[in-house]
Image (cartoon, rainbow, N blue to C red):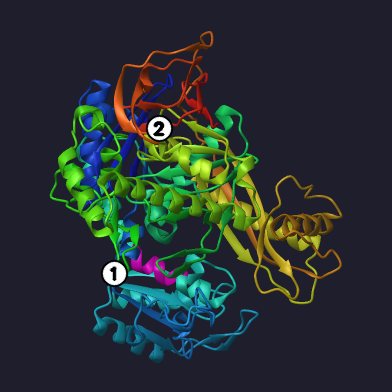
Amino acid sequence: MYTIGVDVGGTYTDLVASDESGRTVFAKSPSTPSDQSLGVMAGLEELARRLGVTRAEMLVKTDRLVHGTTVATNALLERKGAKVALLTTEGHRDVLEMREGLKPDRYDLRSPPPEPLVPRERRLGVRERLKADGSAAIPLDARSLDQAIDAAKKSGANSIAVCFLHAYLNPAHELAAVERLRTAMPDVTVSRSSDVLPQIKEYERVSTTVVNAYVEPVVRRYLTNLEKRLIEAGFKGSLFIVLSHGGMAPVEEAARLAAGTVLSGPAGGVSGGRRCADLVGIADLVPFDMGGTSTDISLIAEGHASLSADGMLAGQRIALRSLDIASIAAGGGSIASVDGSGTLRVGPESAGSVPGPACYGNGGTAATVTDANVVLGYLDASAFMGGARPLDRAAAEAAVDRVAAALGLSRLEAATGIYRMINLNMADGIRLMTLRRGVDPRKFALLSFGGAAGLHAAEVARELEIKRIIVPTVASVLSAWGMLTSDLRYEVSRTHYGAGGRVTADEVRTLFGELEKQAEGRLRSWFNGPIRIERSAEMRYGEQIFEIDVSLDGLDWNSPTLVDAIEDRFHRRHEELYTYSSPGQEVVFVNARVAAVGEVSQRGEGAKAVAQASACKPIGTRKAYFGGWREIPVYAFGKLEPGHSLEGPAIIEAETTTVLVDTGDRVSVNALGWLDIVLR
């Protein structure tokens, strides 16, 4: 039986199949942005070919297919989601536009605030109001509700967000409104805040609910279509979708909470990063995922990746918990251009998979990072994608020549500038994830993955004074491989806020007991394997307005000093994040959170026998620019065995990735067959 991971990127769709023995086979297929399922099915065809079976035979023997999708992400970035109407408490329809009274960059006086997903004419007030304790101050007015529903119907909205004041404490008014909507507008999608994000803070709740309403029809349509195609092709197993928090869920749950899929693909890379940390015994890693369109950067510290509820995408606040991932517009397809002042810029625009870099020969004429790598000799134009897709070196040179002419430089100088610029951009992205969080990157190793990362990892690491790089054999498809290690996960949360009053131990035990029962009960409807419970709380000091997330795992829940232990955890976490704590100040308990995690069996890389340490022989040489034009030895990644070692300069090639090793850098091959590079 197979388990298959599928990660749809901006340029390529990556696929990995692992069988019960741990044998892993992977494939790549061009992404199809107009309908991602077409690229997925084509990729499955290629994956089956590499397994030596038909697609139908492979799918019949597949018990689990785990999928990371960018459908929700693209809908937000391209503003191609549903036409949404918002039903909210009368007098509160402008919360979505006023936000929290702050711009993302409060010192930027020129940039306008992001345009709300719901224009004012489709934000409809309903006469009702709950008090801060959840009791009704103004009962839900049926006439006002009907008028709002009629206005939504006339507006042509095909998705409705319902967010009433204090509905996180008492969802009665929202439930009544949804019931009325189902009758009056049976064909529309409805998202209610008490279901999507039942937590305090009005702006976060309404924004997240609106985002969910905006992307849910698109996500649901895509997942339903994909599931249908898979079944027609012979698939009889379970289809799961990776969510932004790194866990996975069945199709219906992923469609219901569609806003939770906006980091679906990158989350697989973080899961893979955690698995790599376990396998190589390195607790502190910077996962560095460079693909064709973007680079995703995260942090594995002491073997764990942090979760955050501070998500923002395309100017929209998404307060669902997600892995802490920074995405920057830097990839192999990033376009190099010269602005009006004569300055070289690389990105953020990307050539994508269509038309792609000029060297792809698909009609693209703009110079990209990939074109620069071809000009510099780092990529073998004849061996790209194992020779299945040779690159057009002349087209790459012509594209770089146009940039060179605009800069008044030679072709070599322009290509070197493009290469240097993209490396600096990515190093800045890693600084964002490390230095700005008080973490010294020099104490971490760089985990290089994604199809383009190996070409740039050494120079990016050198820029940050990182001394060690790990390159897995599955580097080019590690996000898809990481999905095979994802667990099922269902999260629930509840606000328990009492200003000026300390929470009691009995309240905490009762609250978490109810949440655990709810989370485990929901997960059991999908999964009958072992389940573990993770507990956390969002807390703050009394005078603060933002909470921090505090893990409560490992506490003695029967202890009479439970509350003291929880507050001690908060003080310690605050000091870790901000270098100080104030034990004498009042601690406010705001949100309780429970995650039920269904632990699935993990398949994948296993250790191989380590040969006696020895040098290895190159398969040939290639002229490339390493401080000057030189004949550089080229090694086949697939022929390197555990125990082999080599010293740069060198180029290590696999079918879907290339790794550059500079002069003085040393490479050893570990027991997994992975590259362990120590920089000079």
Give coordinates of residue 586: x percent, y percent: 81, 70
Q: Which amino acid does label 1 sit on?
A: Gly
Dominant secondary structure (helix, strand or loop) of the stretch shown in magenta: helix
**Quarter of the figure with the C terminus:** top right
**Residue at mark 1:** 340
Residue 658 lies left or right of residue 609; in this view the side is left
**Residue at mark 2:** 660
Give coordinates of residue 157: x percent, y percent: 28, 77
**Quarter of the figure with the N terminus:** top left
Residue 446 lies left or right of residue 494; in this view the side is left
Indicate which label's residue lies in the foreground, 1 or 2.
1
Asked where in the image residue 274 lies, by quadrant, the reply is top right
Q: Residue at x 57, y 58 (%)?
A: 308
Q: Please tell me which of labels 1 and 2 falls first in the chain.
A: 1
Please tell me the numbered disc located at residue 675.
none
**Relative height, residue 171 to residue 42 (above, below):** below
Viewer can see residue 243? no
The one of 422 and 469 positioned closer to us in this rendering: 422
Determine the residue located farthest toward the top in the rendered image. 612
Which region of the structure is painted magenta?
208-215
Residue 612 lies left or right of residue 291; in this view the side is right
Asked where in the image residue 147 lies, by quadrant, the reply is bottom left
The one of 236 and 680 positioned closer to us in this rendering: 680
Residue 17 lies left or right of residue 397; in this view the side is right
Q: Which residue is drawn at 57% across and 78% down?
A: 166
- Queried whether the magenta region covers residue 262, the answer comes back as no
Task: Kindly state the secondary structure of the residue where label 1 is placed.
Answer: loop
Task: Kindly state the secondary structure of the residue where label 2 is placed.
Answer: strand
Q: Residue at x 52, y 21 (%)?
A: 670
**Relative height, residue 193 to residue 67 (above, below):** below
Q: What residue type is labelled 2?
A: Leu
The one of 630 and 314 positioned closer to us in this rendering: 630
